[in-house]
Amino acid sequence: MAGKAEKKSNTRSRIISYVMNHQNTSKIEISRNLNISMPTVLSNVNELLDRGVLVETGEYASTGGRKAKSIGINPSYRYALGIRITANHVGMTLVNMRAEIEKMDRVRMKFSPDASYCVELSALVKGFLEDMEAPDKL
């Protein structure tokens, strides 16, 4: 049986996955589509907003009362780096949380199984990431 912390982590992960696949969604939509109670959605979404994982992206039209806010994933919360090594090239791609390409480069570099290749590749990657504002988000 899953512990309370594990269950909460699983719920947060489900919410993040849903929001990543349904940008500009509402808390009500999350509750309905994931079959999670509204109080649970509210507490988890508020926590994710406070952490900066999610952001408010706008408001829905009012049908009376307070306007519902749409939420989405914060694209700059984290980044991923992909490196593609071929026989004659190295390709590097940096993407944000929305899988949007932030930066891309392809460099001619002949593959070698030698340690010197790894040192050169490391320097290449460091140079590629040099102008990244928050390297701790990688």
Image (cartoon, helix red, strand yellow):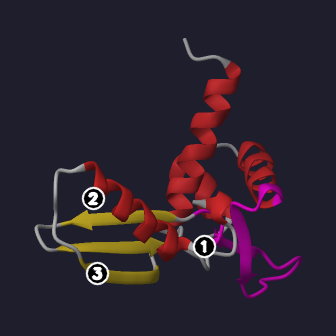
x, y percent for residue 87: 10, 67
Check disc 2 and give the amino acid type.
Answer: Tyr
The structure residue drawn at horizontal position 46% and vertical position 72%, both measured from the top left corner, is: 95
Q: Quadrant of residue 75?
A: bottom right
Label 3 and label 2: CA atoms lie apart by 13 Å
Quarter of the figure with residue 82: bottom left
- Front-lying residue, 33 or 89: 89
Q: In the displayed structure, does residue 126 sit left or right of residue 115?
A: right
* Element class at badge 2: helix
Q: Is residue 73 magenta?
A: yes
Task: Provide the residue span drawn in magenta.
Answer: 50-78
For marks 1 and 2, the one nearer the N-term is: 1
Q: Are marks 3 and 1 in contact (CB under 8 Å)?
A: no
Camera-side residue of 97 and 54: 97
Q: Which residue reaches farthest top?
A: 1
Asked whether 29 falls inside the magenta stretch, the response is no
Residue with the mark numbered 3: 107
SS for tag 1?
loop
Callout 3: helix, strand or loop? strand
**Circle 1 sits on which residue?**
75
Q: Residue at left 63%, top 44%? A: 12
Of the two numbered discs 3 and 1 on the same chain, state the one appearing first in sequence: 1
Of all residues, the one furthest to the left in this rendering is: 87
